[in-house]
Image (cartoon, helix red, strand yellow):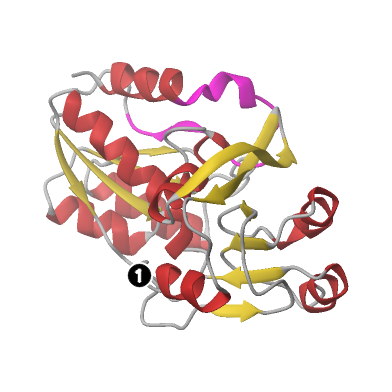
C-alpha cells in the first residue's frame, strides 16, 4: 500500500478534514514521502525518539501516533525538533499523527474506548471543542462505587502509578463524563450536566476546589493511560487493510 493511500484512509476514517483550523496539532501525515510503499505500521501514543527507535527496530515503515511532532507548525529544526526528525529520517520512518479527531471519534476514539473498558453506555457527547465534542457522557451498565471505578481504571497502562481520586461526589456513580488526557478544563460543563464523576487523565491545581464545590468525583488515571485506546483501534483498522502491525507500549506514569 502506498503511504499516501494509508494516510488518506486514516483521514477519511477519522473525519480529519472537519478539524481543519480547529486543532492546535497538525493532523495527518507529518513526515514521509507520500509515494513510498509501506507494509508494516507501528502504533504508539507519543511520537518521540524512544518510539521512533522502537518502531524502526520492529521493522515498521510508518508510525501512527496521537501526539505528533508538529503543534501549530515547526519554525526551527533545532533542539528536540532536530533530534526527533533525525531519528525519523535516519530510519526512513514515516510519521502520521492525529490528535483532536482521535479524541473525538465516537467509535474509534480514546473516550469511546475508555467507555467500553469501563462498561459505560454512551448517552451523548461531552467536552465542547472544535467542530463538536472531544469526550462522552455515559452511564454504567451496573452502578459504580468510587472505589470500584478507581479499581477498573487501575487496570490501564498507568506505569505503576496509582489512580488519583478527588472524592467529592455521591456514594453511587450513575452518570459519568469521560474526557481523556487533560480534561479538567471541562469541569464547568460536567457541573452544568449534573454528572456524578469526571474521568480524565491528569489534573490541575484549580480542579480540587472546582470539583469540591460542584460535588463531583474526579478520577485522574494518567494522560498516557487514558489515551492508548485510539491508536489501538487504528491498529485494528490497519490489520483489516492487510498490513503487518505492531503496538508500542511506552507508559509514562503521567
Q: Does residue 26 appear in the picture of this structure?
A: no
Answer with left or right where residue 149 lies relative to residue 92.
right
Residue at the disc numbered 1: 155
For the residue pair 155 and 79, the one nearer the viewer reads as: 155
Q: Is residue 131 above or below residue 112?
A: above
Residue at horizontal 47 percent and vertical 39 percent from the top: 109
Label 1 secondary element: loop
Residue at horizontal 61 percent and vertical 40 percent from the top: 73
Q: Where does residue 240 sit, x and y in percent of width and height?
A: 18, 26
Q: Does residue 89 appear in the picture of this structure?
A: yes
Residue at horizontal 42 percent and vertical 35 percent from the top: 108
Q: Where does residue 135 sit, x and y in percent of width and height?
A: 61, 44
Q: Where does residue 251 sit, x and y in percent of width and height?
A: 36, 69
Q: Is residue 18 magenta?
A: yes
The quadrant of the image that shows the N terminus is: top left
Answer with left or right where residue 3 lies relative to residue 231.
left
In the displayed image of the protein, which residue is found farthest to the right? 213
Answer with left or right where residue 56 lies relative to residue 123.
left
Which residues fall within the magenta stretch? 14-32
* Quadrant of residue 129 within the rendered picture: top right
For the residue pair 253 and 32, the one nearer the viewer reads as: 253
Residue at horizontal 81 percent and vertical 50 percent from the top: 189
Q: Where does residue 164 sit, x and y in percent of width and height?
A: 57, 80
For the residue pair 252 and 148, the one nearer the viewer reads as: 148
Q: Is residue 40 above or below residue 240?
A: below
For the residue pair 29 and 249, the one nearer the viewer reads as: 249
Amino acid at each position: 500500500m502506498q503511504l499516501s493511500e494509508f494516510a488518506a484512509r486514516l483521514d477519511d476514517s477519522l473525519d480529519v478534514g472537519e478539524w481543519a483550523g480547529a486543532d492546535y496539532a497538525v493532523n495527518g501525515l507529518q513526515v514521509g514521502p507520500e509515494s513510498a510503499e509501506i507494509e508494516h505500521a507501528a502504533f504508539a501514543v507519543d511520537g518521540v525518539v524512544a518510539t521512533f527507535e522502537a518502531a524502526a527496530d520492529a521493522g515498521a515503515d510508518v508510525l501512527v501516533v496521537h501526539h505528533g511532532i508538529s503543534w501549530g507548525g515547526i519554525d526551527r529544526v533545532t533542539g528536540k525538533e532536530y533530534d526527533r526528525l533525525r531519528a525519523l529520517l535516519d530510519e526512513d520512518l514515516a510519521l502520521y499523527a492525529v490528535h483532536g479527531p482521535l479524541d473525538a471519534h465516537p467509535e474509534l476514539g480514546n473516550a469511546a474506548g475508555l467507555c467500553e473498558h469501563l462498561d459505560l453506555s454512551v448517552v451523548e457527547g461531552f467536552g465542547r471543542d472544535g467542530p463538536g465534542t472531544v469526550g462522552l457522557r455515559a452511564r454504567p451498565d451496573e452502578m459504580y462505587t468510587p472505589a470500584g471505578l478507581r479499581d477498573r481504571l487501575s487496570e490501564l497502562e498507568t506505569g505503576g502509578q496509582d489512580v488519583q481520586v478527588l472524592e467529592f461526589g455521591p456514594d453511587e456513580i450513575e452518570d459519568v463524563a469521560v474526557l481523556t488526557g487533560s480534561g479538567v478544563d471541562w469541569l464547568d460543563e460536567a457541573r452544568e450536566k449534573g454528572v456524578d464523576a469526571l474521568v480524565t487523565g491528569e489534573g490541575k491545581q484549580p480542579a480540587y476546589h472546582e470539583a469540591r464545590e460542584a460535588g463531583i468525583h474526579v478520577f485522574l488515571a494518567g494522560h498516557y493511560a487514558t489515551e492508548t485506546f485510539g491508536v489501538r483501534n487504528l491498529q485494528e483498522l490497519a490489520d483489516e487493510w492487510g498490513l503487518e502491525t505492531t503496538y508500542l507500549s511506552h507508559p509514562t506514569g503521567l
